[in-house]
Image: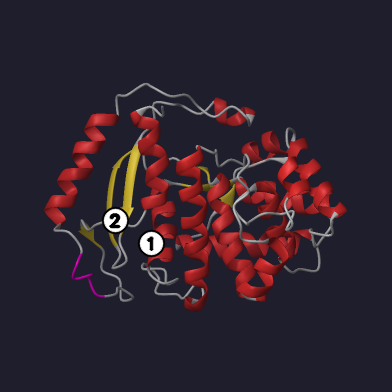
Amino acid sequence: MVPNRMLLKSILPATLIAASFFPSVVAAQTARSPVAPRRELVESVVREAYEKFRSDPSGKNADYIPYLAQVDSKMFGIAIVTTDNQVLTLGDVKYSFSIQSISKVFTLALAMEELGPDKVFAKVGSEPTGRPFNSPLAVVDMPSHSGNPLVNAGAIATTSLISGQNAAEKWNKILDFYSKAAGEKLVLIDEVYQSEAATNTGNKALSMLLAKYDRIYADPFESVDIYTKQCSVGVNATQLARMGATLSNNGINPATGQQVIKSEDMPHILSTIVLFCTLRAHVQLSVRC
C-alpha cells in the first residue's frame, strides 16, 4: 500500500495540468477552457490537499541514487499551471529537484521532432514490458529488446537517437529542448549527476545488452552518460508544472506561446504515457532512472 503523501507526490507530476488561480498577463495566453472548474473550487481543493498532507511523515526518500537520500523529506509543495497560463503555488515550490524519469517523455518528444513517431517506435518499440523498469531480462526476452521509451532500456535507446556531432552537442540540444518546455533556462544539478554517474552500472549493462541486439544507435556508454545528465536536470515545481501544461496544450508552452512539440506528435506521446502509467498502476512498477 502506498502511503497517502507518497501517493499524492506520485500523482501530482502526472496531473501537472490543472486549474486556474493567479492569472499572468502574457500575450501568448490561449482562451480559458469552457469546461475548466471554477477557480474558487479548485483553489479550495488544492488547499485542502496541501493542509492534509504537508505534515504527513510517511514514506521515505528514494535511495537508489545516494544524493536523493539526502534531500530534506519535509519539503512539500504544489504547483499548477493551466493551458491558459494561470498559476497556483503552495509550499516548497522553489526548490530545484532532479527531473529523473519525467525527462524520458521530453527526450521522446525531441526524438520524434527529429525522426518522426514511426521511425522512433520502429527503433525503440512501444509495448509494455511487464517487467521492472530496469529489467535486463526484458531486453533479452522482448522482440523489440528496448521495450518502450519509458523504461530504462528504451529511454537510453531513445537518447541515443538524438543527433549531434559529439556528446556535448547532443546534451546541449536536450537541455535546450527541456528549457523551451519549461519556459525558462534549466541547468544540470551536478551533485545529482555525479552521484548517479557513480552508481549507474545497471544502466551501462542495459546499454551493452542493447548493443548486442543492435538496438542502441550511438556509443552505449556515451548514451548512458547523456541519459544520466538528462535525469539530473534541475526543475522546481512551477517549471515542471509548465512542462506538463505544454503537453496538455498540444505542445504549446502556455507562458511563451512557443510550439515546443509538434502537434502531430502529441497523440503518440500522450498515448505512450497513458499506456505505461496504466500498466504501472496495475502491476505497481516503479519509474526510476
Magenta stretch mostly in which secondary structure?
A: loop
Task: Residue type at mark 1: give it.
Answer: Ala
Outermost residue on the top side: it is 57
Residue picked out by circle 2: 18
Left/right placement of residue 52 relative to residue 198 reads left
Q: Quadrant of residue 190?
A: top right
Residue 94, x across and y down, in percent: 40, 43
Q: Is residue 216 above or below residue 266?
A: above
Task: Residue type at mark 2: give it.
Answer: Ala
Q: Can residue 94 be seen by looking at this rendering?
A: no
Residue 248, x across and y down, in percent: 38, 65
| Mark toward the start of the polypeptide (2 vs 1) | 2
218 in the magenta segment: no
> Neighbour class for label 1 at 10 Å: few (<14), some, many (≥20)?
many
Q: Is residue 71 above or below residue 231?
A: above
| Along the line of sight, the residue nearer the viewer: 274 or 228 | 274
Q: Residue at x 38, y 43 (%)?
A: 11
Disc 2 from disc 1: Cα separation: 8 Å
Left/right placement of residue 157 relative to residue 128 reads right
Left/right placement of residue 222 relative to residue 127 reads right
Q: Quadrant of the N terminus?
A: top left
Stretch of the chain drawn in magenta: 31-35
Q: Secondary structure at mark 2?
A: loop
Residue picked out by circle 1: 245
Q: Residue at x 80, y 52 (%)?
A: 210
Q: Is residue 193 above or below residue 103?
A: above
Outermost residue on the right side: it is 212
33 in the magenta segment: yes
